[in-house]
């Protein structure tokens, strides 16, 4: 029987683990399929307070983990595939293994969104990717394409200019969602080519097991054309990892956990932290803050029950 299990090992989960461990609750962190969370897919983090020179994303998250382990947190590889939150103790399953816990912090984060095209899905890992930092290197000296108009798209495009001959940014509107600083930085880079008001309708060629061309359609007049490229990087946002809680935790129309104030969910003893609930800020620092809140609330609940 655990006092507290944390699902997820990104900024939110690690911070919850640090606080719970320092409160002598001996937290168990189930790392999830994407251990370390979204920070492991990024490069320089320039806006996390305390690092005036910036820090690499994977480095930051690894330090958080070590900090939690120092105070007695245990990390377990694997993914929680089923949860029974109908009564306490809550039951969780990692495959066949059953775990019981008095309190639960859901910090399972959000995963990359895909366009949902068959040709795109067929080419994931063969030129279609959601992670420039992971896969950009393979396209050294080649033209590549990024889809999206937010900060992630700008960040991916800028990163890819280090390898690629040209980086085309395809965005479905004229206006960009990205912050001014990121957009200005991308606009100042002459390796980046801008294709606005366009949507990807197909990726070619699944039969050749590589990306050769992207079919684009104008969102203004529906005209279609070919855009030759050797890789397609998707940077079109994320989907919260809440599927296993559907029907138990209250979720909003996009699948994010509904907050009942602080870190509380609709089930007493289950707390949310980070991008699994936050569709607005979605920053490393806000996720860390949310992890802290969740752990403090879990600790107070356990204390009140003693
Ligand atoms: P985002 O801000 O939600 O932007 C997603 C982009 O993808 C939007 O431009 C959206 O277009 C487009 N999009 C969504 N679905 C699409 C579809 N089916 N087809 C084509 N385009 C689609 O997501 P994000 O860029 O991942 O950023 C998430 C959060 O992380 C933000 O708060 C951001 O500031 C933060 N972030 C910060 C940094 C940094 O500061 N260094 C870096 C990365 C991310 P529309 O604009 O038309 O909706």
Image (spheres, rainbow, N blue to C red):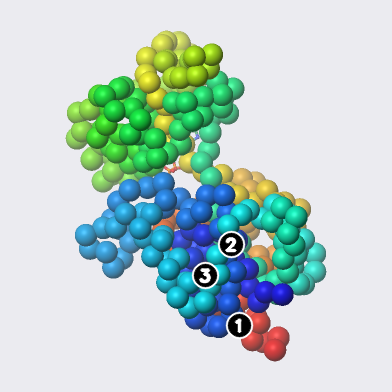
Q: Where is residue 241 in the image (x, y as percent from the top left)?
A: 60, 50
Label 2 CB sits under 8 Å from any ligand 1 atom: no
Tell me what residue is drawn at x 71 percent, y 86 percent. 305
Q: Which of marks 1 and 3 is in front?
A: 3
Q: Nearer the viewer, residue 180 or 10?
A: 10
Question: Which mark sits nearer the N-terminus, 3 or 2?
Answer: 3
| Residue to which mark 2 is pinned | 76
Tell me what residue is drawn at x 59 percent, y 80 percent. 25
CA–CA distance between discs 1 and 2? 25 Å
Question: Which mark sits nearer the N-terminus, 1 or 2?
Answer: 2
* Number of the label disc, if any, that sits on residue 16: 3
User: In the displayed image of the protein, which residue is found farthest to the bottom?
Assistant: 306
Secondary structure, mark 2, is strand
Question: Vertically, is 47 above or below 293?
Answer: above
Q: Nearer the viewer, residue 172 or 169?
A: 169
Q: Position of residue 302 (x, y in %)?
A: 66, 82
């Amino acid at each position: 029987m655990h006092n507290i299990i944390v699902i997820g090992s990104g900024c939110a989960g690690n911070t919850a683990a640090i606080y719970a461990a320092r409160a002598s609750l001996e937290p168990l962190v189930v790392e999830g399929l994407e251990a370390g969370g979204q920070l492991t897919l990024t490069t320089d983090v320039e806006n996390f307070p305390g690092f005036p020179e910036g820090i690499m994303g994977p480095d930051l998250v690894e330090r958080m983990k070590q900090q939690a382990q120092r105070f007695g947190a245990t990390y377990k590889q694997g993914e929680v595939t089923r949860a029974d939150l109908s009564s306490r103790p809550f039951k969780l399953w990692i495959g066949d293994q059953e775990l019981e816990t008095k309190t639960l912090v859901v910090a399972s984060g959000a995963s990359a969104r895909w366009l949902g095209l068959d040709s795109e899905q067929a080419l994931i890992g063969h030129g279609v990717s959601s992670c420039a930092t992971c896969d950009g290197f393979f396209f050294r000296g080649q033209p590549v394409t990024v889809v999206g108009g937010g900060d992630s798209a700008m960040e991916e495009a800028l990163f890819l200019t280090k390898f690629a001959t040209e980086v085309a940014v395809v965005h479905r509107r004229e206006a960009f969602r990205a912050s001014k600083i990121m957009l200005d930085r991308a606009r100042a880079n002459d390796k980046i080519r801008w294709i606005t008001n366009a949507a990807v309708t197909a990726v070619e060629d699944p039969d050749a097991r590589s990306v050769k061309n992207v079919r684009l359609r104008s969102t203004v007049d529906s005209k279609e054309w070919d855009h030759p490229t050797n890789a397609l990087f998707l940077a079109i946002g994320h989907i919260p990892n809440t599927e296993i809680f559907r029907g138990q935790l209250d979720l909003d129309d996009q699948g994010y956990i509904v907050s009942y104030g602080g870190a509380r969910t609709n089930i007493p003893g289950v707390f949310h932290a980070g991008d699994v609930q936050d569709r607005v800020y979605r920053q490393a620092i806000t996720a860390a803050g949310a992890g802290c809140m969740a752990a403090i609330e879990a600790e107070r609940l356990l204390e009140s029950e003693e």
